[in-house]
Image (spheres, rainbow, N blue to C red):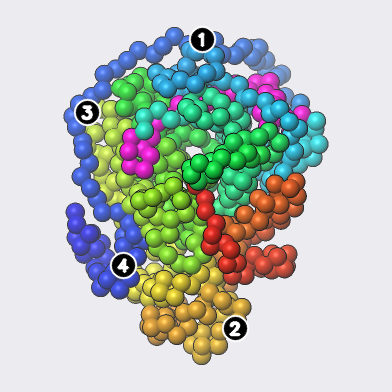
């Protein structure tokens, strides 16, 4: 289907797209490509003999059941202040096909397995706690923040101590990297510690990143450095409070273990400080988890993974389709397509570019994972590339919706053999619906950013096209310009009374496309039948004042390198309320124009 056909079929907006070509990537996103469906069915393989992995608990008595029920009741369950009071849930993930080799050494290929058991490698130098996330500890892990005083806590979150009940494992997955199949990848520097079910009944998987080598480390050392770990710790939480689906971070530690890194792959190797992040997700399975099994025709293992994910991560689908596994798989794929569209639309709304949208970095739960060379827009540039390793610009800002669809097509190919042959073609329908779903979510979010409670597709798209074009032509700041619109009265906007501190909107005041925007914006707001104060309140709740700009993260990193963790802690506090003006953030200049030196900052896949 051609781009013109997509435009005419869905929105009849070709004149607007000619006005602002960047909207092609932002709004329409994908142009569907033919999927290489085949009728071949991968051969089935037998499951390898699994060794016993843990000792079964003693038989339950009525008394023990009642005690456990009472102690886990949300009204009674207290936050744990000692690690000895806290424990992992039963290790269900260890029931999946495991690598029979228990020795931890790097192997280029580990067949017929989903996980390999391997222990984290202890850090050699003293561990220092950079920061903890109190909300995650309390609300997800049922831990009192005072648990950080436990002598074993830092060792636990650094990988130096493995708790009773933990079965550390590294996950085997594959993936397309920059569009090319890379075959086996896997957790090369991450250890899944175990699963936890909290007082709300939520299931979370705890994973250490930077905790040492695994069978999947390839040529790596299994470590992460402080600069990349600070960025991951802060950004996962910033994204959560911006309202973007994401993994979470509980803690960050740093050591003096020397880690050699060539940051820009230019031969300039330097020693950096090692760090470990304890991060959490409902699941760490990715598109590549299914791809590696399908590519190698490991059908039994693929079926086991599909069934596990359905039961543990999408139980509502199983309940809705109790009698048909095919219906469950199709509903799973439809949900992933819809939720991935939602995730990417939220990225676009806050100006976030992931940087490495490989299929191994795409979560099956459609949450943002693996924060590496990401970036938030400063000046509005639809072709913004945060990753200096992305030479071809495959993952630039405006291309993200299209790349997400391409990745979903690869997931569909991986799931195909799990379906009955007669049902496989049905995987195409969610892909065909992706653009429509994405466009609806995208426009809904941007309508709120412009202060609208209702959506008028063609009118609102025209307004957005004018506004974005003016930002692009004048190199105006994306986040600040939308925030300025929310903080200035309509009367002052019409009269061009723009204060000096509205440094985003100030740039476009006399730009031709912004004038066209202002010619129609007041009339569109009148149709909302609301006061200007209500409009401003709504817009301020949809347009952040603070985001994790690269220069803010860099300042925190440089201070942390000198064992001053105050900036990391301050950023964490501020980014938890990104839509609210905060005194300490204003005094720190978090909403001021980026300094000139920030334009020289570069990030890469080296971490």
Q: Earlier in the sequence, mark 2 or mark 1?
A: 1
Mark 4–mark 2 CB contact (< 8 Å): no
Q: Is residue 155 above or below residue 105?
A: below
How far apart, in angstroms, are the residues tagged by discs 3 and 4? 41 Å
Q: Is residue 561 above or below residue 58?
A: below
Residue 173 sits inside the magenta stretch:
yes
Check the image and name the residue furthest to the front: 267
Mark 3–mark 1 CB contact (< 8 Å): no
How far apart, in angstroms, are the residues tagged by discs 2 and 3? 64 Å
**Camera-side mark, 2 or 1:** 2
Q: Residues within 10 Å of mark 4 (few under 14, many from 20)?
A: some
Q: Earlier in the sequence, mark 3 or mark 1?
A: 1
- Residue 601: where, in percent of width, then height? 55, 57
Q: Residues within 10 Å of mark 2 (few under 14, many from 20)?
A: few
Report which residue position mark 4 lands on: 21
For the record, the magenta segment spans: 152-181
Report which residue position mark 3 lands on: 421
Report which residue position mark 2 lands on: 499
Q: Is residue 315 left or right of residue 63?
A: left
- Residue 515: where, in percent of width, then height? 41, 84
Q: Earlier in the sequence, mark 4 or mark 1?
A: 4
Mark 2–mark 1 CB contact (< 8 Å): no
- Residue 414: where, in percent of width, then height? 32, 32
How far apart, in angstroms, are the residues tagged by discs 3 and 1? 34 Å
Look at the numbered disc 2 and give the secondary structure of its residue: loop
Q: Is residue 244 among what the camera can see? A: no
Q: Residues within 10 Å of mark 3 (few under 14, many from 20)?
A: some
Q: Is residue 301 left or right of residue 248?
A: left
Report which residue position mark 1 lands on: 51
């Amino acid at each position: 289907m051609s781009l013109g056909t997509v435009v005419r079929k869905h929105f009849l907006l070709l004149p607007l797209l000619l006005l602002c070509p960047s909207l092609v990537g932002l709004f329409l996103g994908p142009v569907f490509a033919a999927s290489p469906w085949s009728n071949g069915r991968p051969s089935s393989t037998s499951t390898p003999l699994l060794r016993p992995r843990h000792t079964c608990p003693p038989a339950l008595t009525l008394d023990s059941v009642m005690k456990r029920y009472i102690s886990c009741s949300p009204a009674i369950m207290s936050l744990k202040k000692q690690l000895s009071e806290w424990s992992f849930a039963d290790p269900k993930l260890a029931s999946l096909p495991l690598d029979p080799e228990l020795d931890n050494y790097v192997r280029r290929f580990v067949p017929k397995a989903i996980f390999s058991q391997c222990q984290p490698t202890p850090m050699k130098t003293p561990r220092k706690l950079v920061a903890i996330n109190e909300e995650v500890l309390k609300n997800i892990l049922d831990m009192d923040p005072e648990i950080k005083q436990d002598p074993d806590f830092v060792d636990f979150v650094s990988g130096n101590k493995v708790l009773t009940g933990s079965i550390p494992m590294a996950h085997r997955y594959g993936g397309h990297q920059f569009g090319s199949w890379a075959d086996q990848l896997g957790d090369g520097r991450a250890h899944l510690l175990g699963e936890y079910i909290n007082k709300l009944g939520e299931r979370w998987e705890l994973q250490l990143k930077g905790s040492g080598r695994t069978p999947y480390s390839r040529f790596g050392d299994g470590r992460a450095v402080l600069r990349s770990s600070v960025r991951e710790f802060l950004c996962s939480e910033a994204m959560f409070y911006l309202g973007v689906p994401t993994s979470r971070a509980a803690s960050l530690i740093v050591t003096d273990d020397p880690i050699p890194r060539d940051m820009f792959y230019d031969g300039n190797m330097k020693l950096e400080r090692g760090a470990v992040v304890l991060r959490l997700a409902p699941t760490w399975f990715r598109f590549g988890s299914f791809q590696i099994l399908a590519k190698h025709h490991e059908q039994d293992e693929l079926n086991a993974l599909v069934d596990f994910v359905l039961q543990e991560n999408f139980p509502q689908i199983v309940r809705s389709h109790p009698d048909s596994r095919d219906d469950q798989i199709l509903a799973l794929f439809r949900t992933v397509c819809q939720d991935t569209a939602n995730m990417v639309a939220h990225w676009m709304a806050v100006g976030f570019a992931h940087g490495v949208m490989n299929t191994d970095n795409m979560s099956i739960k459609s949450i943002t994972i693996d924060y590496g060379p990401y970036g938030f827009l400063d000046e509005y540039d639809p072709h913004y590339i945060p990753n200096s390793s992305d030479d071809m610009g495959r993952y630039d800002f405006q291309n993200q919706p299209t790349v997400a669809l391409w990745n979903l097509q690869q997931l569909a190919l991986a799931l195909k053999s799990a379906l009955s042959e007669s049902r496989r073609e049905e995987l195409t329908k969610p892909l065909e619906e992706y653009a429509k779903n994405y466009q609806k979510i995208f426009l809904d979010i941007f309508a709120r950013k412009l202060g609208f409670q209702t959506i008028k597709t063609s009118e609102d798209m025209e307004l957005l096209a004018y506004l974005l074009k003016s930002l692009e032509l004048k190199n105006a700041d994306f986040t600040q310009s939308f925030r300025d619109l929310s903080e200035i009265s309509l009367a002052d906007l019409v009269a061009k009374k723009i204060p000096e501190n509205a440094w985003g909107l100030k740039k476009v005041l006399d730009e031709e496309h912004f004038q066209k925007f202002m010619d129609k914006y007041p009339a569109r707001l009148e149709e909302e039948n609301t006061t200007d104060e209500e409009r401003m309140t709504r817009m301020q709740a949809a347009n952040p004042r603070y985001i994790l700009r690269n220069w803010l993260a860099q300042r925190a990193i440089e201070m942390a390198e000198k064992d001053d963790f105050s900036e990391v802690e301050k950023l964490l506090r501020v980014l938890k309320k990104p839509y609210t003006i905060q005194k300490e953030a204003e005094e720190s200049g978090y909403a001021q124009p980026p300094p000139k030196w920030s334009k020289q900052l570069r990030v890469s896949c080296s971490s």
